[in-house]
Structures are given as C-alpha cells and as structure tokens.
C-alpha cells in the first residue's frame, strides 16, 4: 500500500524537507541534499529535526510538542526520512526496523563485473570519522548491501540498492571498496577519479514499514532529484 502525499501549504513546508505524509503517528518526507538529519559538531541548529520541531509547534513558544528521530541519512544524501510523533511510536519503529525495506538509487563511476550481487563486510570508523571494512567482527558491525545494475553508460553505472542493514556511510564505503565509488563522493573516492558532479549521487528512494497504528505494511517513495536524470536518463 502506497500512501499519497498530503496537501500542505508551502508556508508550512519545513526547509530542506518536502512533506510526503503526515498522520497522528508519523511524519514522512524527502530530505534535500546538504541538510543534516540531526545536529553535528559543526552544525547544531540547521537540521531537519529542528525544522520539524518548529513545524509541529506551529510557531507556539509554549508548545512542548516534539518529533522523535527513527533513522538518519548522510548530509549529502537525499531521500526518504521518517520521524515519529511520540516516544512510543519511535520505539515501535525502531524495534521493527529489521523488517523495513529500504531501496536507494546511486550512480557510480565505472562498471561492476557482476550486474547484481551482495556485498558484505564489517564496518569500522576511525578517529577521523572515516568508515572502512574490516575482517574482524569484533572491531566492526556487519553491513550488507544488495545491488542491481539498472543502466550503464561509457563512464557510469546506475544501481538500485536494497539496503539490508543501515550502517554509517555503508553504501558509499561498499561501492568505493568495490572499485566503483559514487559520483560526487569526495570522501570515499580515489584522488585519481575526477568527480564531475557537486552533488552526491545517492538517493533514498523508497521505504516500506509496518505502520505503528494500522499495523499494515505501507510504502513511501521520494522523487528522484533532477541531477540524477541529467547525468543518466532513466525511468525511475
């Protein structure tokens, strides 16, 4: 079941977050690239979490309404994000997160030898916040990325990703270590590869969850950014 977007006045649209669905339990939207999901060391206020807190309070200085974070997207990544409206719903969604189906689109440099497959490794993060794979299960967390090549050009490949786990920078690291770094990724790209895009070509396209109230499976989709279409024409 796909839920259709609500009709929301533009003046109520939180900056950097296109509202796709809202009910008594959840808020779902399409995060724009460049926006943090939550506060970081270098940015405390300009986040989607703060924007949605302002949204649910509707400008009331005395309101105690708040939203609750369920998952995150990297700052440069666009796409679907879901927030809970209560701590109870947050706990339900987190407890059921292993059953969530998460699909991404990404455009990578080069061509993968196998046109579909599963990449598995244990991911660890160093003191400089750089993530990499390790063979030591005691040092890293298991990450599983399933991919399918949807289209290839002379220089690029469009992949559809089934994110089986959701670790920090997971898709970016797995694609880089597979020899096909994501276009626009300056963090996990070899210096010899020239990125011709200022945008990270990674988009969280759809999310399927068990609704906390209806207990039905529902799916949300976030429109693919125009810069994806410009780089690689495809019917998403």
Image (cartoon, helix red, strand yellow):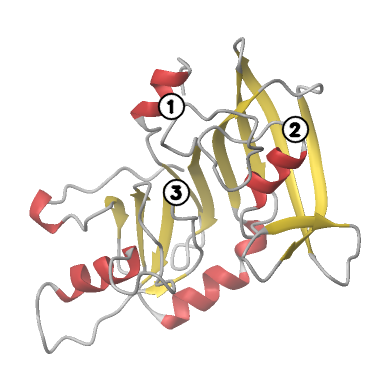
Foreground: disc 3 or disc 1: 3
Looking at this view, name the residue that lies furthest to the right: 136
Frontmost residue, 172 versus 233: 172
Mark 3–mark 2 Cα distance, whole angstroms, equals 21 Å
Q: Where does label 3 land, which residue? A: 76
Which tag, 3 or 1, sits closer to the chain's start?
3
**Element under disc 2:** loop
Q: Are marks 2 and 1 in contact (CB under 8 Å)?
A: no
Q: Residue at x 27, y 67 (%)?
A: 52
Mark 3–mark 1 Cα distance, whole angstroms, equals 14 Å
**Which class describes the residues within 10 Å of circle 3: few (<14), some (14-19), or many (20+)?**
some
Q: Where does label 2 land, which residue? A: 179
Q: Where does label 1 land, which residue? A: 228
Q: Residue at x 34, y 52 (%)?
A: 29
**Residue 131, quarter of picture:** bottom right
Q: Is 59 located above or below residue 196 in the figure?
A: below
With 126 as the anchor, is 9 left or right in this view? Answer: left
Q: Is 164 located above or below residue 92 in the figure?
A: above
**Which class describes the residues within 10 Å of circle 1: few (<14), some (14-19), or many (20+)?**
many
Residue 159 at x, y = what percent?
A: 62, 28
């Amino acid at each position: 079941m796909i839920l259709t977007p609500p009709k929301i006045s533009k003046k109520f649209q939180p900056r950097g977050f296109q509202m796709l669905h809202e009910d008594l339990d959840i808020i779902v939207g399409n995060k724009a690239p460049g926006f943090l999901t939550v506060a970081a060391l270098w940015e405390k206020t300009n986040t989607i979490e703060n924007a949605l807190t302002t949204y649910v309070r509707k400008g009331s200085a005395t309101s105690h309404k708040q939203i609750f974070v369920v998952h995150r997207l990297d700052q440069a990544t666009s796409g679907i994000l879901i927030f809970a409206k209560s701590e109870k719903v947050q706990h339900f969604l987190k407890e059921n997160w292993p059953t969530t189906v998460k699909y991404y689109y990404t455009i990578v440099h080069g061509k993968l030898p196998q046109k579909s497959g599963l990449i598995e490794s244990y991911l660890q993060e160093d003191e400089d916040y750089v993530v990499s794979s390790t063979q030591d299960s005691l040092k890293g967390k298991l990450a599983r990325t399933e991919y399918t090549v949807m289209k290839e050009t002379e220089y690029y490949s469009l992949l559809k990703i089934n994110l089986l786990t959701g670790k920090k920078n997971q898709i970016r690291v797995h694609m880089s270590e597979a020899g096909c770094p994501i276009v626009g990724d300056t963090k996990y790209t070899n210096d010899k590869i020239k990125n011709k895009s200022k945008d990270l070509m990674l988009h969280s396209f759809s999310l399927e969850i068990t609704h906390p109230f209806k207990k039905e499976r529902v799916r949300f989709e976030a429109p693919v950014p125009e810069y994806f279409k410009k780089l690689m024409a495809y019917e998403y």
